[in-house]
Amino acid sequence: MYAELKRLRGRPNGQGRKSATSLRIDKDVLAAYRATGRGWQTRMNDALRAGIESKTAAAKKRRTAR
């Protein structure tokens, strides 16, 4: 029983796809994301990913237009 309780403590193991980092963000931007409630970090990650995908898609479009 002790082994089961010990195993359940702490944060669950992740998938290893994310990395902890330090990032400087404007206070108003951070406040706006935090104001959206739980999951704000995931929403911020999704917005950053969408920006990268948009930039990548635009670059591909420029290359094929040549």
Image: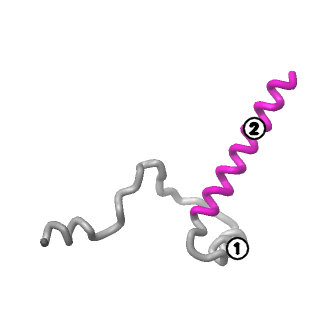
Q: Residues within 10 Å of mark 1 (few under 14, many from 20)?
A: few
Q: Secondary structure at mark 1?
A: helix
Quick one: label 1 or label 2, which is nearer the N terminus?
A: 1
Q: Is residue 65 above or below residue 10?
A: above
Q: How is the image coloured?
A: one colour
**Residue 25 in the image, given as x and y percentages of width and height:** 66, 64
Answer with left or right where residue 14 lies relative to residue 60. left
The quadrant the N terminus occupies is bottom left
Tag 1: amino acid: Ala
**Residue 52 in the image, given as x and y percentages of width and height:** 69, 45
Q: Secondary structure at mark 2?
A: helix
Q: Main secondary structure of the magenta part?
A: helix
**Residue 62 in the image, given as x and y percentages of width and height:** 83, 30
In this rendering, the label closer to the viewer, 1 or 2: 2
Residue 57, disc: 2
Q: Cα distance, mark 1 to mark 2?
A: 27 Å
State yes or no: discs 1 and 2 in contact (Cβ < 8 Å): no
- Residue at x-position 35% and y-position 66%: 11
Q: Is residue 56 above or below residue 41?
A: above
Q: Nearer the viewer, residue 24 or 36?
A: 36
Q: Is residue 17 above or below residue 21?
A: above
Answer with left or right where residue 18 lies relative to residue 45. left
- Residue at x-position 77% and y-position 34%: 59
Answer with left or right where residue 20 lies relative to residue 6. right
Residue 32, disc: 1
Q: Nearer the viewer, residue 25 or 64?
A: 64
Q: Is residue 60 magenta?
A: yes
Range of the magenta residues? 42-66
- Residue at x-position 70% and y-position 43%: 53
Q: Residue furthest right?
A: 66
The quadrant the C terminus occupies is top right
Q: Is residue 26 above or below residue 63?
A: below
